[in-house]
Image: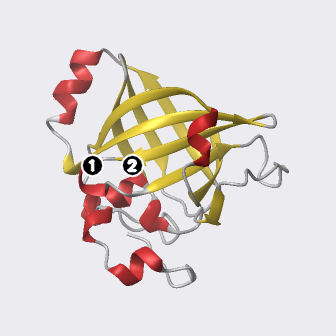
Amino acid sequence: MALEIERKFLVLDDAWRTQAKEVIPMAQGYLNDLASMDTGSNGGGQRVSVRVRLEGDEARLNLKSREVGHTRQEFDYPIPVDDARALLELCVGGLIDKRRHLVEHLGHLWEVDEFLGDSAGLVVAEVELDAGDEWFERPAWLGLEVTDSTRYYNLALASRPYSQWSEAERAATDLESDTCL
């Protein structure tokens, strides 16, 4: 079983751009019913998201357990690009359109996602770790941690994009009240 251990943060400014080594255009969508998604904590609803993604000139099918926090089961498979394009036509909810910028910072690879389309204006940074308590140096451009805030999950953005958030939601720094889909 594959585990993904990932922490997610908002960014404070564009200082990360000078450190970006590569940019990958991405389009992704979800094949299962977003309305019946559940965190998996109570046994109801769907407990896995099924995502198809175009990453530059490659494509992937991804299954991820629906759990809040930094650790989830993840299964990721390469698929033909033409299959991914056909599957994107079958997705429910909106499609996620973003540019992923790869940024090396003191031994860790940061993925800075700059959202486009309906979620334009949102920029988040993620770092994958080997352990949930692994120490890492926070870049100066890193802001508030939103790992446990489900509204920043791509799955949530597919059903309720950033453009639909209220000003209060965009400015919120108290994420304790965030709820799951």
Report the residue at 82% width, 55% height from top. 133
Q: Is residue 179 above or below residue 78?
A: below
Q: Residues within 10 Å of mark 1 (few under 14, many from 20)?
A: some
Q: Which mark is residue 32?
A: 1
Report the residue at 39% width, 49% height from top. 49
In terms of secondary structure, where does tag 2 sit? strand
Report the residue at 36% width, 33% height from top. 26
Identity of the residue furthest to the right in this view: 135
Left or right: residue 32 versus residue 151 is left
| Residue 104 horizontal/vertical position (percent) | 70, 33
Indicate the amino acid at tag 1: Asn
Spatial CA distance of label 2 from label 1 is: 7 Å
For marks 2 and 1, the one nearer the N-term is 1
| Residue 38 horizontal/vertical position (percent) | 40, 66
| Residue 15 horizontal/vertical position (percent) | 61, 47
Location of residue 156 by image quarter: bottom left
Left or right: residue 88 versus residue 50 is left
Residue that badge 2 annotates = 49
Q: Nearer the viewer, residue 72 or 45?
A: 72
Q: Is residue 66 above or below residue 25?
A: below
Q: In the rendered structure, are the residues bearing label 2 and label 1 in contact, judged by CB atoms less than 8 Å apart?
A: yes
Whether residue 179 can be seen here: no
